[in-house]
Amino acid sequence: MTRGQETELPRVIKLRYIDSGGDYRQLVAESRRLEGQTGRVSEAGLPIMLDADHAGRIADSWLHESWIARDRVQLTVPPTLLGLEPGDLVEVDHAGLSRAYRITEISDQGAREIEARAIDTSVYVTGRSLPRVSEPPERPVTGSPDAVFIDLPLLPGEQSPEAGIVGISQSPWPGKVAIYKSAVDVGYRLAGLADSSATVGRTVTALGPTIEGRLDRSARLTVELDFGQLQSVPLLTMLSGANGAAVETSNGLWEVLQFETASLVGPRRYELSGLLRAQGGTEDAMAAGIPEAARFVVLNPALKRVAIPVDAIGLPQNWLVGPARFDIGHASYHQYSHAYSGRGWLPLSPVHLRGMRQGQDLEISWVRRTRIGGDNWELAEVPLSEASEAYEVDILSGNTVVRRFPITCHRRLIPHQIRLPISAPFPRRFHAGCTRSAPQPDGAWRGPPSSEVG
């Protein structure tokens, strides 16, 4: 018989576990021996859920078993006791005392060599401890994220016109931010998770409309960011799609523009130059101009796309935005109401409108644009991204539409008999707008018109 050194035994047992009755926090149950010279601490982590009473009893049993098992015995028994196996309990009489041992090792070399450790089964029958009352920790209110809902046309590289764009910003960033939506103020469903803060701010200066499709090196737009930063890029990089931003204009629409140079002129304040205006078919937004204090959002991967069913377009939706680690009842969640207009479904307006006299008649023509796959310069004509090609030509007298012609090609001859009865002086103005079949067979959607010409 042998007894292990006291200094090799633990004085403290610590057991980590998941609290099943207290918000599933990780807690530690501890059992400590009051006597002895050892200072050892034994720890273990259990990836299971326990209540505090059960975890405490396991720690107590572990500590008592460790001290009892320091007594060991080595036995030699005949091969006839082949039924003995590791884990079996045997009674050993010594000096008139009988004690239980658990077999740990057996070596069969003729006679059977057995090693066993002392055990006391009473250590596994422990009394119940006092209940541990623990209040769940107060969940901190980190502030509510700021969300901006953006209606944009289908941008290059995107293939989901039904997606709405949400930009979420907060400092410090609380981790993942959840976006929930519901048609009513109950039954919210998760619409998406934002992984990083959007780069948002507001304009400091106003900017009026200008010619579209050309690089404007004279205009300047100053913005002040709430979060994030801006940087300049080479011209070719900008023409490849970099440094895009959405700016809210005076008519409530969002203009997409690009900037080549971003010069830091103050704390979080940048002056943007080398502007490409009315990108992505947002000429109607640019025509209204950008006012001061307009919302400014950089178009980058931090923006979250949320699916908007076709039958929900134009209908107000309730949105809840807050840290994903909290439930929607937490004070950090903020409620918004927004109805997406389905701008991504609208066809782009035609460009290069021309009007030419053919005797007394007027021939008008234009060039079609496409929402998808129009960046290939090798194509003779951009692909048709709609179900069918259709246009509407409006003849205007002043600001009043006096004639409208639905046609299916990008050229139209208007006889003078149609125009002469109109009392307004010649030349009258016209504009053309594309129409597309709606995703549902009943009806069609008309895109924004092109610029009017004389």
Image (cartoon, grey):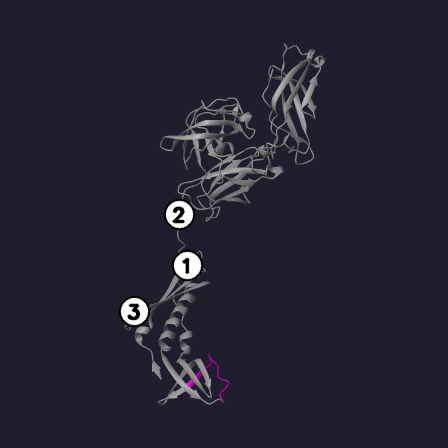
Checking the image for residue 142, the label placed there is none
Magenta residue span: 80-91
In the picture, measured across the screen, residue 280 lies left or right of residue 141, that is right
Which residue lies most toward the left here?
37
Mark 1 or 3, nearer chain start: 1
* Residue 184 seen: no
Q: Mark 3 sits on what residue?
A: 39
- Specify the amino acid type for callout 3: Gly
Checking the image for residue 26, the label placed there is 1
Q: CA distance from mark 1 to mark 2?
A: 18 Å
- Is 365 above or below relative to 177? above
Comparing 144 with 163, the one in front is 163
Say which residue appears at 57% left-offset and 32% top-offset. 153
Mark 3 or 2, nearer chain start: 3
Q: Main secondary structure of the magenta part?
A: loop
Q: CA distance from mark 1 to mark 3?
A: 25 Å
Comparing 67 with 365, the one in front is 365
Q: Is residue 88 magenta?
A: yes
For label 1, count other residues whose C-alpha is less than 10 Å away and answer few (under 14), some (14-19) or many (20+): some
Q: Which picture quadrant has residue 55?
A: bottom left
Give SS at disc 3: loop
In the picture, measured across the screen, residue 425 lies left or right of residue 223, that is right
